[in-house]
Amino acid sequence: MSAWSDSADYSHGFFIIPLGLFILWGKRKTFEKLKPQPSRWGLVLVVLSLFTYIFARFAQIITLSSLSMIPLFAGIILYLYGYVFLWESAFALFLLFFMIPIPSQIYSAFTIHLQLAVTKASVLIAGLLGVPVYREGNVIHLADRTLQVVRACSGMRSMISLLTLSAVFGYFTLKSNVLYYHLIKAKRSNYPFLSPPLLAQKFIKIDRDLKTVVGDGQVVEAHWRQQADETMWKMNIDGGGTGVWGYVPEEALDLSVKLALDLKA
């Protein structure tokens, strides 16, 4: 925790664990539906992680000792609950990487290049504006003063925080629509977050239908399927139907979510 409190670059580390727990709490209904299938490979991962931690502590490799905690947590989940639970917890575990400080050697190597890049860009802009300027490394000489582009100006601090924010934003907004769609196309309906489709077209005379995919209580993919032949009773694209991605009424999306919740799918 001292790395988070003493360094402004990693002050966001205090929010990572609560955020990870919040993500896992949001998946509580998914976990309730899953059947634990413990794996002994989890115990192997736990033992290896503990050996790595002990070695890193004796060798005073702080980054390695911190990193060993992530596979330790993964091994515990795998040993007690199995691969499916580990998969559902993967993003929460992935977030833990963002709270571990980058080794100072690597950090300095990146920072130096970024400082030089910022210095060169500043000198270029000043030259375009007609300001007399001379660069010497990361030092900028003006007519009446000298400026230095220090580590804080390299942008590394903002980059680390923005990467963390981008990962979280992407998780809560994108929800991997493409992954869901291709899993359904591959007919991998045995996945824990997918439900078997209901084929109502066989009993209703229509020329199109609306296909929606609901996961974690929200619609993650929706498109219209138009009939290609009057003899067809299924609108499946694989069977010759035409897929149309366009406007879908909110009422239809709400009905899909309600139906999934009622069926506990």
Image: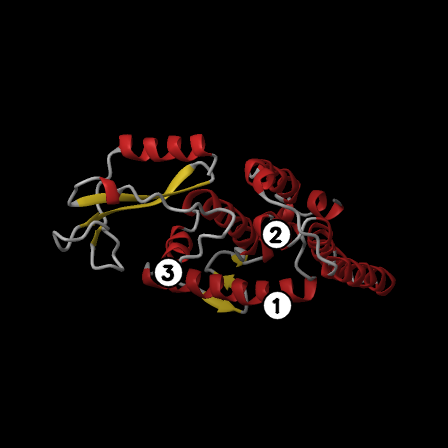
Residue 17 seen by the camera: yes
Identity of the amino acid at label 1?
Ala
Identify the residue position indicated by label 2 in the image: 98
Q: Secondary structure at mark 1?
A: helix
Viewer-side label of 3, 2: 2
Above or below, comparing residue 104 to residue 254 in the picture? below
Q: Secondary structure at mark 2?
A: helix
Left or right, 265 with respect to 95, comes to: left
| Mark found first going from the N terminus, 1 or 3 | 1
Where residue 18 sits in the image (x, y, percent)?
Answer: 64, 37
Identify the residue position indicated by label 1 in the image: 109
> For mark 2, does the 10 Å Cα neighbourhood hold few (<14), some (14 to 19), or many (20 or more) residues?
some
Above or below, comparing residue 246 to residue 58 in the picture? above
Above or below, comparing residue 189 to residue 210 in the picture? below
Give the numbered dot on residue 164: none
Q: Residue pushed farthest left?
A: 230
Where residue 227 sits in the image (x, y, percent)?
Answer: 16, 51
Above or below, comparing residue 2 to residue 47 in the picture? above
> For mark 1, does the 10 Å Cα neighbourhood hold few (<14), some (14 to 19), or many (20 or more) residues?
few
Front residue of this view, candidates 154 and 80: 80
Disc 1 to disc 3, how far (Cα)? Answer: 25 Å
Give the numbered dot on residue 125: 3
Disc 2 to disc 1, how far (Cα)? Answer: 19 Å
Q: Residue pushed farthest right?
A: 58
Where residue 19 sits in the image (x, y, percent)?
Answer: 60, 39
Identity of the amino acid at label 2?
Phe
Where residue 51 sits in the image (x, y, percent)?
Answer: 83, 63
**Residue at 23 percent of width and 51 percent of height:** 235
Which quadrant would the N terminus be assigned to in this image?
Answer: top right
